[in-house]
Image: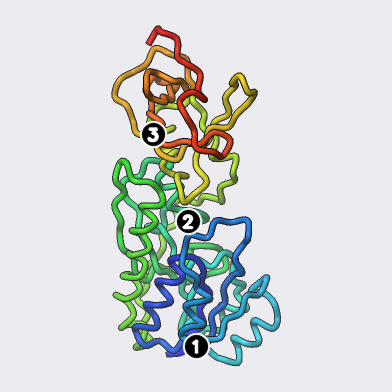
Amino acid sequence: MKAVVFAYHEVGARCLQALLDGGVDVQLVITHTDDPNERIWFTSVAELATKACIPVITPESPSEPDVQARIAAIAPDYIFSFYYRQMIPMSVLNLAKIAPLNMHGSLLPKYRGRVPINWAVLHGETETGATLHVMAEKPDVGDIVAQQAVPIGPDETAGEVFANVTAAAAETLKGVLPQLLKGEVPRRPNNLAAGSYFGGRKPEDGRIHWDQTGAQVYNLIRAVAPPYPGAFSDIETANGTQRITVNAARRLDTPFALQPGIYRIGSKAIGVCGDKMAVELTEFLVDGAPGSLNSLPEAPATH
């Protein structure tokens, strides 16, 4: 079976390796050039493909005529997309003789769209997963081919969940690969009415709103903890406005009779939320540098 693979990030690398291990003849890999402004903490698809002697291209858009012509010349049985960051036009997808297939990081039809793992953690979900589905004109709406559930622990960060989803994505692909190699694509409807769609997240979406509940604040911190940029809050200090970036926290069971915000209480940094519940900031930065308790305002003695 001949394949063309659009791929990026850790899921892209793991799923590309699964195809190679399974005997798929990958004749072209389309990936992205790394953004110098992005923290690159994942395996390089380009390096993996190059080591496997597979041609690699990094076009600005998959819609470029040269890209389509090159894929048409290969006449692939399958086109795969593994965490490729752009929509692939139908004119390209239709070049797959059997099917164009995408790996998505959720249990479709839930959490269609962008950064599904971060959204799932933010919303306090207890389960997500990996889904291989048929690509269509709109994102994540095609028939489901295979999927595997992944639990989300109450204290797991999005990065930890992502690692588990990555493993599940590779296993999902490996499980269905014998059928795909026979030209068989198991399909069941993707019931969109039972799911949801979410867009991308912007840096400002990481701002902590302390008037929210303790659960909401804690879930935000988990959802954007490293390797993501971290949740943040601006506070007024003797040095002016300073940004506190929270990289790790834990929920506290004791309510605090304080206004919502960040305080120094004894030897701990505490964030009090709108429902009077709180989180302890166990790891934080002040204006990008490792923070200290002395950076924080001392709480009044009413708590």
The residue at the far right in this view is 65
**Which image quarter holds the C terminus?**
top left
Q: Residues within 10 Å of mark 1 (few under 14, many from 20)?
A: few
Question: Circle 3 — which element?
Answer: strand
Query: In this rendering, which labeled residue sits more in front, label 1 or label 2?
Result: 1
Q: Secondary structure at mark 2?
A: strand
Q: Is residue 260 above or below residue 112?
A: above
Residue 211: where, in percent of width, then height?
49, 23
Q: Say the numbered circle drawn on residue 245.
A: none
Query: Of the residues under marks 1 and 2, which one precedes in the sequence?
Result: 1
Q: Is residue 198 above or below residue 170?
A: above
Instruction: Tell me the CA gap for discs 3 and 1.
Output: 46 Å
Q: Residue 53 got which mark?
A: 1
Residue identifier under label 3: 282
Q: Residue furthest top?
A: 302
Q: Earlier in the sequence, mark 3 or mark 2?
A: 2
* Residue positioned 51% across, 32% down in the render: 208
Quadrant assignment, res 58? bottom right
Q: Say what amino acid the circle numbered 1 marks.
A: Cys
Tell me where residue 176 appears, x and y as whole percent: 32, 76
**Residue located at (59% from left, 71% from top):** 88
Instruction: Give the camera-side residue of 298 and 67.
Output: 298
Q: Measuring 35% from the left and 70% from the top, which residue is drawn there?
A: 170
